[in-house]
Image (cartoon, helix red, strand yellow):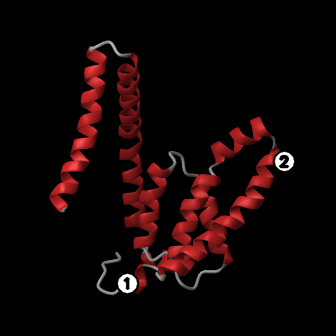
Amino acid sequence: MKKQNDLISYLIPALIIGFSLGARLGGFELGERLLGNLGQYLKTLLLLLPPVFILIGLFEVWVPRRTIEKHFGSSHGMGAWFWLMLLSATIVGGLYVSLPLAYALYQKGTRLRLVYGFLGFSTICRIPMTFFEASFLGLKFTLIRYAIALPLVIISAILIERMTGERGCEEKKGRKCD
């Protein structure tokens, strides 16, 4: 089964690239646009990911596990949600940045509900997106969206943690957390 999954994971991108190149050589407009979008996407990834991984590596080295466990571990308070919301507001790059950072937080002992909350906040609370939204849709709309979305992120993060039954990295037996 593993070899079949590996084959599929290589076959699909190869087919997409092959189709794009074939369509471009044949003068098919869709292929040219597809190849152009692929090039733009790869350029964005190559410019964004190296600095992100460097910063996350520095975070893992410089921030002690005890500090993260103190603020985001099993004994966290309501302030943890606020700090995670502020951290997620600074995210530029969307999930490309949020997912590795969420994993680093989880490895340092952040409770799982807070990791889920961080991921939810990072899709809602980004400062550039908020300014863009407020300028086009109005401040009232943005404030109403925040008032509805933020509590829903917290509630859903708590419910997902309860449904999965996991509390965080510190409670997994036999798992390397640091």
Image position of 15 with respect to 126: above or below: above
| Amino acid type of the residue tagged 1 in the rendering | Lys
Percent coordinates x, y for residue 156 in the rendering: 61, 70
Query: Disc 2 and disc 1: Cα gap in Å?
Result: 44 Å
SS state under label 1: loop
Please state if 171 lies on the left or on the right of 146 as rendered.
left
Q: Quadrant of the C terminus?
A: bottom left
Q: Is residue 71 left or right of residue 136?
A: left
> Which residue occupies the foreground of this view, 130 or 79?
130
Measuring 44% from the left and 49% from the top, which residue is drawn there? 96
Q: Nearer the viewer, residue 7 or 49?
A: 7
* Residue drawn at the location 48% of the way across and 78% of the way down: 164
Side of 66 where 173 appears, left or right: left
Where does label 1 land, which residue? 172
Q: Amino acid at mark 2?
A: Lys
Residue farthest to the top, as pictured: 27
Is the residue 148 above or below the residue 26 in the image?
below
Q: Residue at x 30, y 34 (%)?
A: 16
Above-or-below relation of 57 to 128: below
Indicate the quadrant where residue 106 lies.
bottom left
Task: Give the x, y percent position of residue 6.
Answer: 20, 53
